[in-house]
Amino acid sequence: MLAIFCLFVRYNGMSDIFRFKQFEIDQELCAMKVGTDAVLLGAWAYGGKKVLDIGCGTGIISLMLAQRYPDADITAIDIVDDCCRQTRMNADKTEWGSRIHTVNQSLQDYAAENEGKILFDAIVSNPPFFVDSMKNPDSFRTLARHTDSLPFSSLAKGVSHLLTPDGTFSVMLTEECYKQFTDEAWFSGLYLAEDIAFKPKETKPVKRHLMKFVKDRKVVPVCATHILQNPDGTKSDWYKKFADDFYL
């Protein structure tokens, strides 16, 4: 039932363009297109002076954070070269392009090369979350959607190595992955500080979680649940207000 989290892509002629209030996303080079998951994360994720976007894809989250945090210097990494090129293209069309830096590298390699050299006060990721499901024949779509290239243990360890002692890690996960990732995070010294659960509709079960992790073991999590759609399929008042700074 993941279709509820996919947004209608607004086409400009025949081009693969999604338009927001202050920027637009060209998606032609990326297997994973703009969806509600990315919009929710980009509108909510905690930022800072030095931000790392893990698995930048089209660059949508980096751009949303650049809009929300005018002083943020953002490093956007992705294992797929086309995604880095797409992020660079989209960033260069905005006034924030000089604050977004792309790196074509896996998190594992990036963390190994930069541990002890670079620390971020905010890290954000909309990671692959399909663990045991059937693979897509499109290899790049599989890479973007499945945990093979970025297991949760590697994600948690990489974030822990690159995050400042008082920094924040913001992540979007499915209900099915919630406990598994929370356990992996705990073993890497990351503790759940905030959890926003989402239901597609009031009568449906929780499908997604926006989660904030910190390095403070004594943190007490703040939890909430929100509804994305009204019974008639229109966006809920909460969702419209939440994403109002971005949607046209």
Image (cartoon, rainbow, N blue to C red):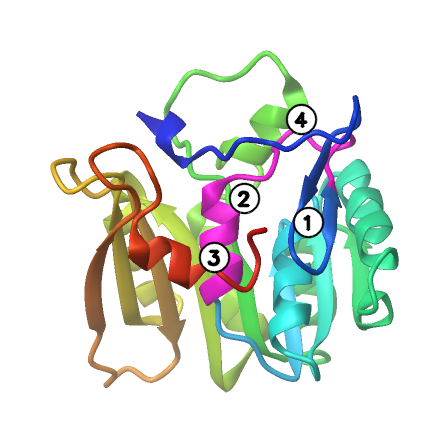
- CA–CA distance in space, label 2 to label 4: 14 Å
Return the disc, 1 or 3, that comes first in the chain's sequence.
3
Identity of the amino acid at label 3? Leu
| Residue 244 location (% of width, % of height) | 49, 61
Look at the numbered disc 1 and give the secondary structure of its residue. loop
- CA–CA distance in space, label 2 to label 1: 8 Å
Give the labeled residue for mark 3: 41
Give the labeled residue for mark 1: 106
Asked whether the residues under the numbered discs 1 and 3 touch, taking CB atoms below 8 Å apart as contact, a structural biologist would say no
The residue lying at 38 percent from left, 21 percent from top is 133
Q: Which residues are magenta?
A: 26-44
> Of discs 3 and 2, which sits in the foreground?
3
Q: Does residue 138 appear in this view?
A: yes
Identity of the amino acid at label 2? Leu
Return the disc, 2 or 4, that comes first in the chain's sequence.
4
> Of discs 4 and 1, which sits in the foreground?
4
Identity of the amino acid at label 4? Phe
Give the labeled residue for mark 2: 150
Give the labeled residue for mark 4: 140
- CA–CA distance in space, label 3 to label 2: 19 Å
Q: Is residue 28 magenta?
A: yes
- CA–CA distance in space, label 4 to label 1: 14 Å
Look at the numbered disc 2 and give the secondary structure of its residue. loop
Q: Quadrant of the N terminus?
A: top left
Q: Is residue 30 magenta?
A: yes
